[in-house]
Image: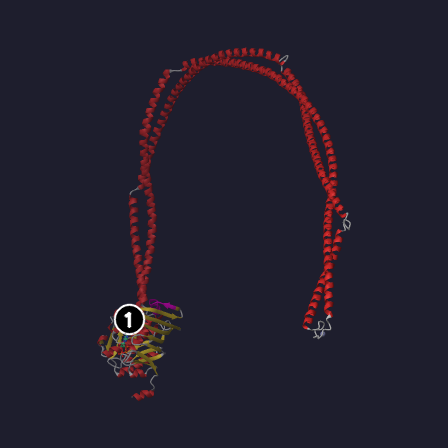
Amino acid sequence: MRFTRIAIRNFKPYEDAELDLRDGVTVIHGVNGSGKSSLLEACFFALYGSKALAGTLEDVVTTGADDAEIALEFVHDGGEYRIERRIRVSGDRATTAKCVLEGPEGTVEGARDVRRHVASLLRMDAEAFVNCAYVQQGEVNKLINATPSQRQDMIDDLLQLGKLETYRERAGNARLGVEDVLTRKRSVLEDVESQIETKEEADLHATLNALESELDSLDEEISNYEGQRDKAKAALDAAEATLDEHAEKRERLDEVEAAIEDLTAKISTDETKRDDLSERVRELDAAADDLESDIDDALDRADLDDASDEAIAGAREALSERESGLRDDLSEARTRAQAFETQAERLAERAADLESRAEEKREAAEADAETAAEAERELESFRETRAELRSSLDDAEARFEDAPVELGEAADLLEKRREARSDARESLAETETELKNARERLAEAERLRDAGKCPECGQPVEGSPHVDAISEREAAVESLEADLDSLESDVESRSAAVEAAEALVEIENRAGSQRDKLDLAEERIADREETVESRREAAAEKREAAAELEAEAEEKREAATTQAERAEEVAETVESLEADLEALDERRDRLDRVESLVDARAEKIDARDRLREKRETLADVNRERREHLRERRERRDELRETVDEEAVEGARQRRENAAAYLERVEDEVLPELRDKRDELQSRVGGVEAELEQLDGLRERREHLSERVDALESVHEEVSTLESTYGDLRAELRQRNVEVLERMLNETFDLVYANDAYSRIRLDGEYGLTVFQKDGTALEPEQLSGGERALFNLSLRCAIYRLLAEGIDGAAPLPPLILDEPTVFLDDGHVSRLVDLVEDMQNRGVKQILIVSHDDELVGAADDLVRVEKNPTTNRSTVERTDAPTVESALADD
Ligand SMILES: Nc1ncnc2c1ncn2[C@@H]1O[C@H](COP(=O)(O)OP(=O)(O)OP(=O)(O)O)[C@@H](O)[C@H]1O
Ligand SMILES: [Zn+2]
């Protein structure tokens, strides 16, 4: 096993440090207090945790820091391992917050499991590690000062000899256990044997024989008594049988006497009943006779010769035949009556219908006549109007007799005249204009003339050649004035003519309208004349039709009356038929009466016959009873003779005696004997059980002694095993002691160059003695400090070698770690130490870690590690430096 790398944080003086560790000799150097030992402690702590500490867990965490981390990597037995721990401080307590071991077998977690795993890997716990591989600073005297037995334990543990002791102890415990069981079994065996002895001494078979013969005689006695008892029982039974027989006879006698009494009573009761029955028979006979005469009366009334069933049936049949005939007639008559009634109703309805139609016709005729009368009245008035219009027209014609035109031409005339008048008025107006112009010209001419100007052209005239013009103009005015006068009168006459024509036109117009009115009147007259004629004809026709309808209605009414009368007649027939039917019912009732009377009589006779029979039966019963009675009386007499009172008394006596004997034997003697027998039987049972127990005990003794034998052999084996383990350990130890002694002497010779000591002795109990050359023995404590240090080193190296050689291969040893081995050593011995280290290396120790500031040791190192502490921060650092060369070593010199 070799360390390959250590990394720490906040561990003691270190803040953060990492160091790869190689094979060979690594020397860690630095000034005092720089942290060298702490680096080795870190490796040890990584492996074993708090068990590796002299102090407490919080000591490993840098003062003032919260937590510390340590990671150690190592190779072991071909596998790579890594252990990581983290320690956390809270308050003034520190705890392991993380602890993990990772290796080829997997991961182990938790401080305790990791520690156990490491211990089993290295086959050494923390203490063994310190004793073997890790020589701590100042531990010089530890092994030397230890007592031989402490030393023995220490070395036995390292060599695993402790296990043999454990096995020996276990075998010892097993032996003690077997001894316990063996003791217990032996005592049980003894107990069983003493029990068997006691039982055998008691002579159980003799006791059993005595008890059995006693039991036999007792059985005999009991069966004797039982025989006697059976005889007494038989005697008792016989006496009781006699008494029972007697009692039975008595009982039977009582029964017979009771039966006799009962029979006598019954006979007399039934005789009384028979008398009653005779009386009732007589009564029924009389009633039947009465009914006979009633039947005769009923026959007379029903007109029957006899009351036989055939006669009555015949009469009933005749009645039925008659009835069915009557019912046929009746039904036919009812149908007919119904038919007549229906016809009469229909005819009456028809007559009423015709009458109402005639009435309608008459009313229509009246209406026509009225219309005709109205038209006639209008005709009269229209004729008057016509006459008036004719005379007016005559007047108008008369007015035209003196007129220039005929009637009808007045309008043309008026037209012509109005034209003529308008022509005249035009001429008048022209003339008036001409006159006006003529007068103006005249006036002009006169003004010019007065002004001396030409009246023709307006030229001033001297001497007026044209004076003539004025007179001309005056003549024109005069002629025009004359024309105007004539024209004015012409217009006047023409206006009068127009007025006359206008009057004529008016007459003519009036005559025209009157002629129209006359035409209308003529038309109306013709229309009314036509109406009068046609309405009168229509009225006459309708009256005729009404008369015809009335006649027909009269006929229908007569027919209805006839049918009603017929219906009446048929109804009478119906009534008489119904009366006949009723009469038939009455006759049937009479027949019924006959029948019911006949039935009643038959019933009476039946009842009488039944009573007679009953009476006869009673007589028979009584005859039988009398017979029984006679028999019973005979039996009674017989029984009375057989009852023997003396014999009964004897039997009673015998019964009492037997009962008394039985009571004594059954209630006292036999129970006593039986109890005694039970007791004897249980005693026999007890003895038998004891004999059985004896058999059981013998069997048990056999088992027990077998078991004891087996246990004894086990005990022997275990004892052998125990002593074997003890012997083995002693033997192995002896061998180890011899080897160890040899190695110790070799090493000590190597490191201590002093001729004073011849050899060191290690005895079987690990006692150490140093022998001087002169043969005097010294205790190791008596050596000097340096000698002790060398002795200690020698012993450690010897143990390490012993282990390495003893168990090499199975569990490669951890590195050899030496912390300040040079203290107490002078220079010469430091050289010897270097030789020892070399020797160890040569013997196959792969990795050696040494803390030292000795230059010689530094010079022998394969690897050199320097530890420094920063004086201001007080934190340590670690640094690998190359191994010093020969040159540098020379330079130092
Ligand atoms: N928990 C801690 N926190 C801080 N510093 C610590 C702690 N524990 C120890 N130290 C310091 O570490 C140093 C001890 O280191 P160590 O014993 O490894 O030194 P060394 O190099 O072996 O010295 P020497 O040569 O004297 O044996 C001391 O200075 C001590 O004050
Ligand atoms: Zn003129």
Q: In the drawing, does residue 148 fall left or right of residue 256?
A: left
Q: Which residues, given as a range, are shown in magenta?
A: 107-120
Q: Is residue 738 visible?
A: no
Q: Nearer the viewer, residue 76 or 521?
A: 521
Q: Position of residue 697 (x, y in %)?
A: 33, 47
Residue picked out by circle 1? 58
Q: Is residue 616 magenta?
A: no
Q: In the drawing, does residue 696 fall left or right of residue 359?
A: left
* Colouring rule applied to residues: secondary structure
Amino acid type at image mark 1? Glu
**Ligand 1 located in image quadrant:** bottom left
> Does mark 1's beta carbon lie closer than 8 Å to ligand 1?
yes
Q: Position of residue 425 (x, y in %)?
A: 72, 59
Q: Is residue 112 magenta?
A: yes
Residue 393 vertical position relative to residue 456 in the rendered view, above or below: above
Q: In the drawing, does residue 532 fall left or right of residue 589?
A: right
Residue 758 vertical position relative to residue 484 in the rendered view, above or below: below
Q: Quadrant of the N terminus?
A: bottom left
